[in-house]
Image (cartoon, rainbow, N blue to C red):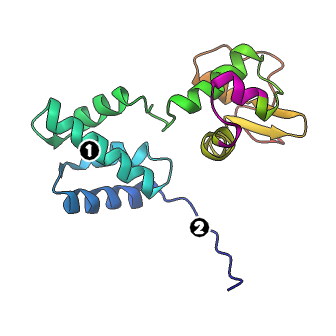
Amino acid sequence: MGFTAQLDFYDTPALEHIVHRSSDLLGAHVDDAGALEIARRSRGTPRIANRLLRRVRDYAQVRADGVVTLDIARRALELFEVDQSGLDRLDRAVLSALCKRFGGGPVGLSTLAVAVGEERETVEEVAEPFLVRSGLLARTPRGRVATAAAWTHLGLDVPPAAPFSDEGTLFG
């Protein structure tokens, strides 16, 4: 066809609407606060919002009365290791390795993948796009580097020579 489309990420209100609609289709009971919490942590992606919804719904059915509230959503997402910014275990492992093992970088993609025990393609195609978009990681000609925001997110002191500003921009 020759047509290439570029899709933008969804904002939180749109994702909240998707969570409510999907919960109706699944027969799950989700209150507004629970839907908002799931939407906030879904990385701007409906597929992830729906995956998180199914996992939180299962948690609510097993550990609560089946209703997804804010408290239930938070407890379930904590159990599934999805933090308040939407970072999962792999994302945090990449940032942790970059900051703690490699001093913030620069480090090559293959070396970073070996350090976290994942395939190079998984790090590059799954974790890296969200980390870059979130301003936590930057790709440079010399390799990947952690921004000041990455150090802060991990609760670490930002080294004086940390690349990029707190805003995570290339020119800030």
Which corner quadrant of the image does residue 158 belong to? top right
* The N terminus: image quadrant: bottom right
Q: Residue at x 22, y 40 (%)?
A: 58
Label 2 neighbourhood size at 10 Å, few (<14), some (14-19), many (20+)?
Answer: few
User: On the rendered structure, is 6 left or right of 30?
Assistant: right
Segment colored magenta: 111-121
Residue under pointer 1: 33
The secondary structure making up most of the magenta span is helix
What residue is shown with label 2? 7
x%, y% of residue 132?
68, 42
Q: Earlier in the sequence, mark 1 or mark 2?
A: 2
Q: Tell me the residue at 58%/21% (across/down).
A: 154
Above or below residue 160? Residue 5 is: below
Q: Position of residue 73 (x, y in %)?
A: 28, 37
Circles 1 and 2: CB atoms closer than 8 Å: no
Indicate yes or no whether the magenta region holds residue 116: yes
